[in-house]
């Protein structure tokens, strides 16, 4: 069964214009094997180390940015110093649970966005990201 997954990942990488190196295949397998999710570079690196994949943090960083440019994942800048990579590239929004560094998907149909400003001359709106920050209620 793992061989079938590897072939589909190789094809997916090739279709996006990326050469399917061993490290890209291994990282893509870890990244996409668990369905839609949100990971930081450090979290994927930790998973790779635990799975015995010999990659540096810099390689994971570079690979995730290559995957982003190829349209395989999208970047979520939730906090200034913390960037998540989202395997769900469809239009949707996010909850961010403060203090837990957890990101949850919100279906695009759950939010209506209107009255957007006119973009500057020669520009168009590419995407609107909504991040709703949550925290646990304080007990009284």
Image (cartoon, grey):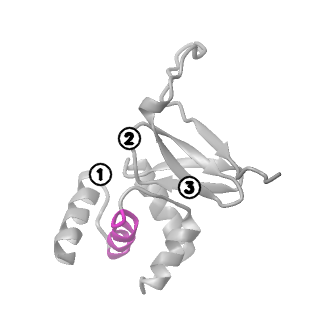
**Element assignment for label 3:** strand
Earlier along the polypeptide chain: callout 1 or callout 3? 1
The residue labelled by disc 1 is 16
Mark 1–mark 2 Cα distance, whole angstroms, equals: 16 Å
Query: Which residue is at the front of the view, 120 or 81?
Result: 81
Mark 1–mark 3 Cα distance, whole angstroms, equals: 21 Å
Residue 33 part of the magenta segment: yes
Q: Are marks 1 and 2 in contact (CB under 8 Å)?
A: no
- Residue 61 at x, y percent in the picture: 53, 64
- Residue 99 at x, y percent in the picture: 71, 59
Residue 12 part of the magenta segment: no
Q: Quadrant of the N terminus?
A: bottom left
The residue that appears at 59% across and 57% down in the rendered structure is 102
The residue labelled by disc 2 is 90
Earlier along the polypeptide chain: callout 2 or callout 3? 3
View extreme (right): residue: 140
**Element assignment for label 1:** loop
Q: Which residues are magenta?
A: 22-34
The residue labelled by disc 3 is 84
Mark 2–mark 3 Cα distance, whole angstroms, equals: 15 Å
């Amino acid at each position: 069964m793992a061989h079938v997954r590897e072939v589909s990942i190789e094809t997916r990488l090739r279709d996006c214009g990326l050469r399917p190196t061993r490290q890209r295949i291994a990282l893509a397998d870890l990244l996409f094997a668990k369905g839609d999710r949100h990971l930081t570079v450090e979290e994927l690196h930790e998973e790779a180390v635990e799975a015995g994949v010999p990659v540096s943090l810099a390689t994971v960083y570079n690979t995730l940015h290559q995957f982003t440019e190829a349209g395989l994942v999208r970047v979520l800048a939730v906090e200034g110093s913390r960037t998540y990579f989202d395997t769900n590239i469809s239009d949707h929004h996010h909850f961010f649970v403060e203090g837990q560094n957890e990101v949850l998907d919100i279906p695009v149909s759950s939010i209506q966005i209107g009255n957007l400003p006119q973009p500057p001359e020669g520009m168009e709106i590419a995407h609107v990201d909504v991040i709703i920050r949550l925290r646990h209620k304080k007990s009284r």
